[in-house]
Image (tube, rainbow, N blue to C red):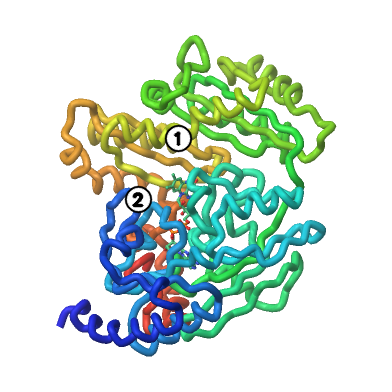
């Protein structure tokens, strides 16, 4: 009997229990009500939910898990549903939507920590930290709708990783509901704690397959008091990498972001993104967007950046540079970087790769992967952009102007193989930011070390023996 038919009657009985606990308003079963939870933004992975349940507290989550376990029904934790790999899409399971669990439980500026529930929107956490005179540095374009639970479950990256690390690096403690309904209370706010295995790291990046994160203690930092932003034009990715190397040594931790754009991306942004204008009188093969920040209000970063760029100019690494003289100009420069995703949509279909290699190999990678893609389809347009300072590129390939989108997308396996084989050759990762979800399960099996894969499977079995947490994702 198909799985779906097998589970449906059990779910009916379960639903009554859940309605009794949560109230009918917080158990959705109508298809139209559930629609926002069963598909992600790009609608690449249509799903189906038995119900969407909205717990108000950790005890509710534990209750839901115990009931589902009793009935053998699978669960998919969901945050803001901004994930890009289909990880939060349900298939014949119950969605546990954590949005109601959005309290800031505690903020301790002296300890530089904030304790938040998993359903807090990332921006709300940033705002709460700001109100206490501190910085919570995780920042990504989806910050107005993604939730902390989702950020931790995907180990999100974003634009400040170079200085502050990924989501994983920003966590001190976690509260997690396990597959048997027990609650692991690991909400410590300690910077030193060597009491055995550091279990929180199992759940960070586990994409909802090992437990439901219900709260976290996060690290805060001093508020930046000074900032400098520059856009630089270079002749090649190799020049951009040489510039990164120089700036990193010279400017140390003040270098907060170092982002890369190729000419194709810049031209597409200028053509399609409203309100942007050409930064230079001429165009360049490669661009770097650079940001420095400091918590020291007396440190003027603009002259430091100017001096570093002048030396790079002397050394023939940089062709031209603009240093923002106002926060408005800084925002305009960032708009050029942030507009790439929108501009790429306007250029038609694209095949995307979210990869990382050691920073020192990034220019070689761009060169080799571009050549490999052009040999598959000479008219394709390479749009490799992103967080070069983290060794992370969105190595995207846009369709030729005169080709049918579907014909182009049919070539996805060939492009994936070419790009990911090169990633593997350089000891890189086929998923630097967005995770595995549904999108990259096959690729994970192909490229992950077999021993590591077996360990992952063992951990999954140990923590979720019935396989009820987010089945069919990641592994
Ligand atoms: C415009 C845009 C820009 C983006 N930019 C970036 C970027 O720069 N860097 C980056 O890393 N990502 C980026 N993303 C991807 C996405 O925003 C991140 O993966 C984000 O961390 C997902 O959070 P979410 O709350 O939306 O999670 P969801 O999409 O709801 O879920 C993602 C995964 O986490 C699991 N999950 C969710 N909540 C929990 C929980 N409480 N406990 C356990 N598991 C849970 C889900 O089951 C799913 O597998 C971007 C997305 C968009 C749309």
Badge 1 marks a residue whose secondary structure is: strand
Q: Position of residue 93 (x, y in %)?
A: 32, 74
| Residue drawn at the location 38% of the way across and 86% of the way down | 17
Taking the image as shown, residue 304 lies to the left or right of residue 101, namely right
Give the residue furthest to the top: 281
Nearer to me, 93 or 205: 93
Vertical placement of residue 141 versus 193, above or below: above
| Marker disc for residue 385 | 1
Disc 2 under 8 Å from ligand 1? The reply is yes
**Residue that numbered label 2 is attached to:** 41
Vertical placement of residue 48 versus 74, above or below: above
| Marker disc for residue 240 | none
| Residue drawn at the location 54% of the way across and 34% of the way down | 259
Nearer to me, 208 or 60: 60
Disc 1 under 8 Å from ligand 1? The reply is no
Q: Earlier in the sequence, mark 2 or mark 1?
A: 2
| Residue drawn at the location 42% of the way across and 41% of the way down | 394
Q: Position of residue 463 (x, y in %)?
A: 47, 81
């Amino acid at each position: 009997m198909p799985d779906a038919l097998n589970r449906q009657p059990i779910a009916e009985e379960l639903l009554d229990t859940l309605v009794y606990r949560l109230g009918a308003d917080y158990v959705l079963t109508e298809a139209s009500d559930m629609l926002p939870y069963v598909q992600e933004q790009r609608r690449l992975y249509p799903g189906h939910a038995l119900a969407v349940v909205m717990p108000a507290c950790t005890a509710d989550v534990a209750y839901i898990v115990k009931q589902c376990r009793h009935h053998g029904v699978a669960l998919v934790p969901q945050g803001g549903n901004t994930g890009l790999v289909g990880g939060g899409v349900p298939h014949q399971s119950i969605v546990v939507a954590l949005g109601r669990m959005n309290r800031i439980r505690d903020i301790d500026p002296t300890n530089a920590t904030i304790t938040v529930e998993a359903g807090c929107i990332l921006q709300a956490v940033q705002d709460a930290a700001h109100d206490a005179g501190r910085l919570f540095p995780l920042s990504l374009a989806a910050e107005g709708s993604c939730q902390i639970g989702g950020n931790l479950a995907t180990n999100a990256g974003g634009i400040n990783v170079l200085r502050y690390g990924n989501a994983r690096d920003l966590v001190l403690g976690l509260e997690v509901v396990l597959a048997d309904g027990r609650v692991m209370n690991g909400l410590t706010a300690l910077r030193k704690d060597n009491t055995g295995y550091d279990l929180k790291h199992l759940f960070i990046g586990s994409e909802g397959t090992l437990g439901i994160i219900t709260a976290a203690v996060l690290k805060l930092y001093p508020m930046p008091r000074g900032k400098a932003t520059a856009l630089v034009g270079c002749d090649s990715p190799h020049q951009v990498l040489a510039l990164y190397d120089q700036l990193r040594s010279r400017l140390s931790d003040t270098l907060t972001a170092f982002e890369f754009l190729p000419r194709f991306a810049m031209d597409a942004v200028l053509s399609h993104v409203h309100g942007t204008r050409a930064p230079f009188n001429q165009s360049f093969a490669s661009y770097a967007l650079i940001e420095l920040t400091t918590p020291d209000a007396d440190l003027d970063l603009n002259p430091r950046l100017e001096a570093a760029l002048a030396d790079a100019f002397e050394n023939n690494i940089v062709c031209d540079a603009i240093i923002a003289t106002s926060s408005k100009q800084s925002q305009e420069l960032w708009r050029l970087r942030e507009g790439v995703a929108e501009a790429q949509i306007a250029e038609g279909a694209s095949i995307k790769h979210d990869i990382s290699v050691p920073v020192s190999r990034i220019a070689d990678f761009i060169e080799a992967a571009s050549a490999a893609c052009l040999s598959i389809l000479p008219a394709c347009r390479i749009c490799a952009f992103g967080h070069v300072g983290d060794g992370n590129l969105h190595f995207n390939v846009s369709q030729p102007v005169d080709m049918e989108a579907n014909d182009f997308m049919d070539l996805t396996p060939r492009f994936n193989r070419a790009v990911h084989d090169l990633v593997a050759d350089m000891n890189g990762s086929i998923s630097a930011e967005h995770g595995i979800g549904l999108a990259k399960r096959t690729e994970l099996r192909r490229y992950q070390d077999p021993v590591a894969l077996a360990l992952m499977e063992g951990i999954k079995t140990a923590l979720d023996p019935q396989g009820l947490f987010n089945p069919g994702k990641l592994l």
